[in-house]
Image (tube, grey):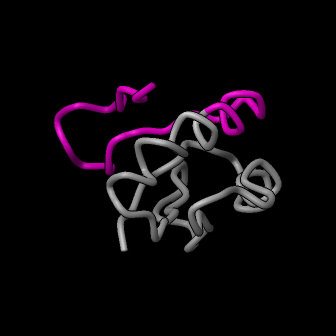
Amino acid sequence: MERFFVRAESVNSVRRALGRAPGGAKVVGRFDRETIECSHTMSEQSFTRYWPEIASRLEKAGLAVVERPGTPSTERETEG
């Protein structure tokens, strides 16, 4: 199970943005005060296919995918 992190004010805003997202993308919970931890169950092939849709849903909701807090780079490049 792979993890990704979203900068958001609330867990519910991320849940609403993901809605019925493909690939088993779901909210795990709050990682820290500013970051929500999410997971997906996609294989590499599915990740390549569905990641742009997931990233788009989050972007439309005004949310940003970020690196795990505590790593030197704070912004994660969205693949697409």
Q: Is 22 left or right of 5, judged from the image as shown?
A: right
Taking the view exactly as shown, the residue that stands out farthest to the left is 72
Q: Find residue 42 and report its horizontal and vertical position in percent.
A: 44, 64
Q: Is 71 left or right of 59, judged from the image as shown?
A: left
Q: Is residue 11 magenta?
A: no
Q: Find residue 61 and report its horizontal and vertical position in percent.
A: 77, 34
Q: Quadrant of the C terminus?
A: top left
Q: Find residue 38 and report its horizontal and vertical position in percent.
A: 52, 63
Q: Quadrant of the N terminus?
A: bottom left
Q: Nearer the viewer, residue 45 or 71?
A: 45
Q: Is 39 left or right of 75, judged from the image as shown?
A: right
Q: Is residue 71 magenta?
A: yes
Q: Is 64 left or right of 79, judged from the image as shown?
A: right
Q: Quadrant of residue 11?
A: bottom right
Q: Residue at x 35, y 65 (%)?
A: 2
Q: Is residue 76 above or below residue 14?
A: above
Label count reads 0
Q: Residue at x 46, y 71 (%)?
A: 41
Q: Which residues are magenta?
A: 56-80
Q: Find residue 35 and report its horizontal and vertical position in percent.
A: 51, 52
Q: Nearer the viewer, residue 67 or 48?
A: 48
Q: Main secondary structure of the magenta part?
A: loop
Q: Is residue 4 above or below residue 31?
A: above
